[in-house]
Amino acid sequence: MKVSVALAAYNGEKFIEEQLGSILAQLGADDEVIVSDDNPSGGTKAAVERVGDPRVKYIEGPGQGVIKNFECAIAHTSGDLIFLSDQDDVWLPGKVQAVTDAISRGALLVMHDAKVTDEALNVTDESFFAIRGTRTGFVKNLIKNSYMGCCMAFDASLKGDILPFPDDLPMHDQWIGLKAERAGKVVLIETPYLLYRRNGDSLTGNPTSFAQKLKWRFSITKDILL
């Protein structure tokens, strides 16, 4: 089973070498990491080149924000199993094997737990699942999303259902998770296989109103049903 990692980057030079090191240590010779860089004039490309691994394939992103950048990275994957990755986290040993085993047993999408850390990787919370109240279920995750892309992987057969992303998506990970809920089996792994780094440079959304959240849920439901 060929593994592809879709990594969306933007000014990722501070942490991406460490992240790539933690990923590549778990990949085979025929696997790949697609780094889609949404700011090619920044320092990400040079950092990727310093890693010097032919399994890492650098491409220029569309320059339209994080959702479209992930879409670009996913579209360029060629593997049987697709992992999503942010640029500043750290994969923990056993992640790829645990997810691959779950996919081999019939899961369409897998999400594992993560430890939340500060910028220096000091653990601040032992379980993202506990913080977020993570569980499966279409209605549950439509009302309050608990899908988190950096902890997700899915069978490549799902690509035809999720791509292209609708233009009005609030979150790509919620879209992928909800599509998987309707199309097949979703499995949660309670073991944390990621250090989820929170730092001042992380991309976070602005506060949204209740009306905006309602609009987003209507839009994503419409997109899924159509």
Image (cartoon, rainbow, N blue to C red):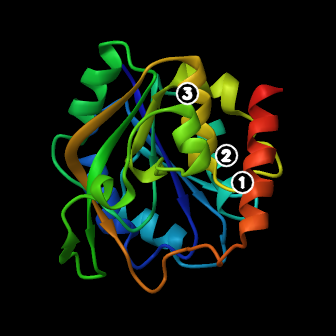
Residue 42 is situated, as x and y percent measured from the top left of the image, at 60, 79
Label 2 and label 1: CA atoms lie apart by 5 Å
Q: Earlier in the sequence, mark 1 or mark 3?
A: 1
- Count of picture labels: 3
Label 1 and label 3: CA atoms lie apart by 19 Å
For the residue pair 173 and 9, the one nearer the viewer reads as: 173
Q: Are marks 2 and 3 in contact (CB under 8 Å)?
A: no
Q: Are marks 2 and 1 in contact (CB under 8 Å)?
A: yes
Disc 3 marks a residue whose amino acid type is Ala
Label 2 and label 3: CA atoms lie apart by 16 Å
Which quadrant of the structure image shows residue 1? top left
Residue 49 is situated, as x and y percent measured from the top left of the image, at 44, 64
Q: Is residue 61 left or right of residue 48?
A: right
Which quadrant of the structure image shows residue 62? bottom right
Q: In this view, does 94 lie to the left or right of 12?
A: left
Q: Is residue 77 visible?
A: no
Residue designated by label 3 = 180
Q: Can residue 214 be seen in this view?
A: yes
Residue designated by label 2 = 71
Judged from the image, the secondary structure of the residue bearing numbered disc 1 is helix
In this view, the residue farthest toward the bottom is: 200
- Label 3: few (<14), some (14–19) or many (≥20) C-alpha neighbours in 10 Å: many
Seen in the picture, residue 123 relative to 142 is either above or below; the reply is below
Q: In this view, does 71 lie to the left or right of 158?
A: right
Q: Earlier in the sequence, mark 2 or mark 3?
A: 2
Judged from the image, the secondary structure of the residue bearing numbered disc 2 is helix
Judged from the image, the secondary structure of the residue bearing numbered disc 3 is helix
Residue designated by label 1 = 68
